[in-house]
Image: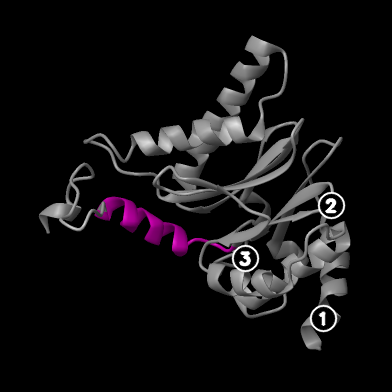
Amino acid sequence: MAYDRGITVFSPDGRLFQVEYAREAVKKGSTTIGVKYKDGVALIVDKRSVSRLLEPKSTEKIHDIDDFIGCATSGLVADARVLVDEARKNAQIHRVNYGENIGVEMLVKKICDMKQNYTQYGGARPFGTALLVAGTDDLGVHLFETDPSGALVSYKATGIGSGRPAVMEMFEKEYQDDMGFEDAMVLGLRALGAAIEEKPKAESVEIGVAEVGRKFRRLSEEEISALIEKSAPAENQ
């Protein structure tokens, strides 16, 4: 028991139990998907309401960080909000200091540095949230996954949250490099459907898109509905 009470104490087999517990919090979060396509990257999030009394628009799972970078979260919502605010602050500081937009990888490393700090010092707990960060910069299109430990990994397509196993299984089988926008969206929505075990609904799905030469944007409910309809035949085959 002593090993999982302190964040700074390693177990005899080299584990930090508090970090592992934080990962479990992420696994209980809503399914969040990131997928690259030719000249862009999309974030697809399941935001089904737990109560019919909840206002759907009050649930925000995709956040703008700057003009060309966005992120989606899974895990503890309050923890995610703190990290998003930190990311926005770092993006603005870089713009003021250097007169240019921050690089996606540089921004993600700054977020992960903050996460890692909370695994190394006593008196605080790790962040119980993972972020998928999507954006474009001079080096191209990027999709990064961050972990409560402060680790970061770049992916072509990935998922976090409760539906990750089903999402990754479908991506491993069907993802292809240089997919078009529509093909990538259809695959992502099919993966989301496999994760939640039902057909996604436009009002309970949020999609953010970062494309080369365009600002980060969210798709409208009408656009999402049209993409869901295109994904439906593939699900029924």
**Residue 198 image position (x, y, % from top left):** 67, 79
Reading the image, the residue beneath label 2 is: 38
Could you tell me which secondary element the residue under label 1 belongs to?
A: helix
Quadrant for residue 63, please give it: top right
Amino acid carrying label 1: it is Ala
Q: Nearer the viewer, residue 153 or 215?
A: 153
* Tag of residue 234: 1
Asked whether residue 20 is in view, the answer is: yes
**Residue 131 image position (x, y, % from top left):** 55, 47
- Residue drawn at x 86%, y 35% is 213
Q: Quadrant of the C terminus?
A: bottom right
* Tag of residue 77: none
Amino acid carrying label 2: it is Lys
Query: Was residue 20 drawn as part of the magenta stretch in this picture?
Result: yes
Tell us which disc is closer to us: 1 or 3: 1
* Label 1 CA crowd tier, 10 Å (few <14, some 14–19, many 20+): few
Magenta stretch, main secondary structure, is helix
Reading the image, the residue beneath label 3 is: 48
Amino acid carrying label 3: it is Arg
**Residue 38 image position (x, y, % from top left):** 84, 52
Q: Would you say 35 lies left or right of 77 here?
A: right
Instruction: Check if mark 1's residue and mark 3's residue have beta carbons within 8 Å.
Output: no
